[in-house]
Image (cartoon, rainbow, N blue to C red):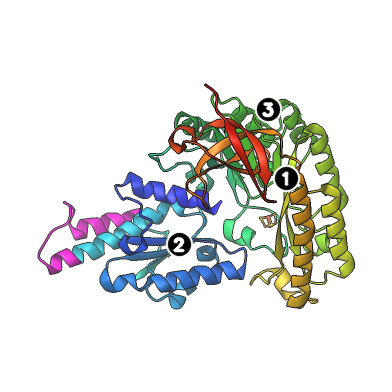
Amino acid sequence: MNERDSEQVARTFVEEGYTLTPEEGEADAILINTCSVRDQAEQKALGKMGMMGKYRDARPHVVYGFMGCMAQSRGEELFERVPHLDVVVGTQKYHRVFEYVDRILRKRLEERMDEVGGEIGTVSVEEEMDRSSQRVKSHVKVVSEGMVDVAEEEGSQNTIKDHVPRPEQRATAFVSIMQGCNMRCSFCIVPDTRGKERGRPMSAVVDEVKGLVDAGVKEVTLLGQIVNLYGRTEFEKVDGKSPFVQLLEAVHAVEGLQRIRFTSPHPIGYRDDLVEAFTYLPKLCSHIHFPMQSGSDRILKAMRRPYRNEKFIAICEKMKAARPDLAITTDIIVGFPTETEEDFQATVDCVRRLEFDNSFIFRYSKRKDTPAAEMEGQLPERVKEERNQELLRVQGELTTRKNAALIGTRQEVLCEGPSKTNKARLSGRTGQNKIVIFDGDAERMTGEIFAVDVEDSTGYTLYGTAVVRG
Ligand code: SF4
């Protein structure tokens, strides 16, 4: 989701004539889109921003900004942590980042031009400052030299809709269909940083997908904090179908689109109409990422996850019946406060029973300002680490076995371009979201779907040969 939001911000800069650079030392503005899921992520962002202050010595005009969840939750306080910081913009104000950065950058460049007796553009400093302050009035708080904007904004979910045009062929794209979450999981800060659940109009999502397909995209991933609850407060059910299923049908009808994914669904609101959709919408990929978090009902309750493990299992089983080749991946937290050995074993049993294709396993770590951080019964790091290692081992065996079973099969693979670890080879994904490495011509094959004969597996990655016709 952060990646998608960052792209939207990048697009506004590109539209206004800026160029993107991977070289921090060349940038006139350095923005970090922050995550607050774990304290560690915040510390990393603060450390990185601190280090990048060095560029100001050589280039005093450089503008530094934090965006996203940490910006939202910490706001003004960040100026104390990072003295060279200029801008702090929250999760409902991504569309305003450009004007804040541009305003400061122009001012600094103009000041420098004045110093050397030059000019910049045709707008006077006074005019520009007047114009800028008109545009940003009431949303921006000026803190000494910096700006902070973390206010809520109605309709902000509709602002994440544009993509950066790319010279190279692009296989896949994320589409943000909603923002926010109405749940209150005790370990999560998202409801505070992203606000209430709110969906975009279906027609806007469909138009965005059409635009992506016109630009050559074959696969889209629909994004939402609880994606299957999309539109439940804004749109009616039609013929017993939820707004999310209606949206899936509408996106499925986009000509030229070949694959649809979505992330992440939640057991709440995962009803039979969505299960059924997998039987009649063939573009839906045979994979869901379905966070379980724990296999123990007691821990689910402590996490304030309003479902029992039985319900989670029942949905997975229905899904496998609807789409027999379905791959399921999940998120699990081990070492949550008060988790006993018995609770942990319930999670291990559930992982074995459901045979996840992969699990993203997190050792519980305290997240400031969440109820779980204040709970009694915090576990020692050693216990968390042991449980983490054990579950990783169980999942590793399952993943290795499942991927080994694919050796000798032919898979449809969407080529995403050169492999990140070996640029000489290509990388792509199967419908089950398994990564496959194969040889081929990047220019011709990127963004296309090929049959690949799977010949080997190293556990998590498959290797094969593309069956290139004619
Ligand atoms: S469902 Fe829970 S974990 Fe997911 S975003 Fe909402 S509060 Fe956070």
Asked if the stretch drawn in magenta spans residue 103, the answer is no
- The picture quadrant where one finds residue 140 is bottom left
Seen in the picture, residue 418 relative to 143 is either above or below; the reply is above
Cα separation between marks 2 and 3 = 38 Å
Kindly identify which residue carries mark 2: 32
Are the residues flagged by discs 3 and 1 in contact, CB closer than 8 Å?
Answer: no
User: Residue shown at 43%/51% (left/top)?
Assistant: 9
Nearest the camera: 121 or 349? Answer: 349
Q: In the rendered view, does 449 fall on the left or right side of 136?
A: right
Front tag of 2 and 1: 1
**Residue type beneath disc 1:** Asn
Give the SS element for disc 1: helix
Nearest the camera: 129 or 360? Answer: 360
Nearest the camera: 119 or 450? Answer: 450
**Residue type beneath disc 3:** Pro
Kindly identify which residue carries mark 3: 282
Seen in the picture, residue 427 relative to 78 is either above or below; the reply is above
Region of the chain picked out in magenta, as a range:
112-135
The crowd level at tag 2 (other Cα within 10 Å; few <14, some 14-19, many 20+) is: some
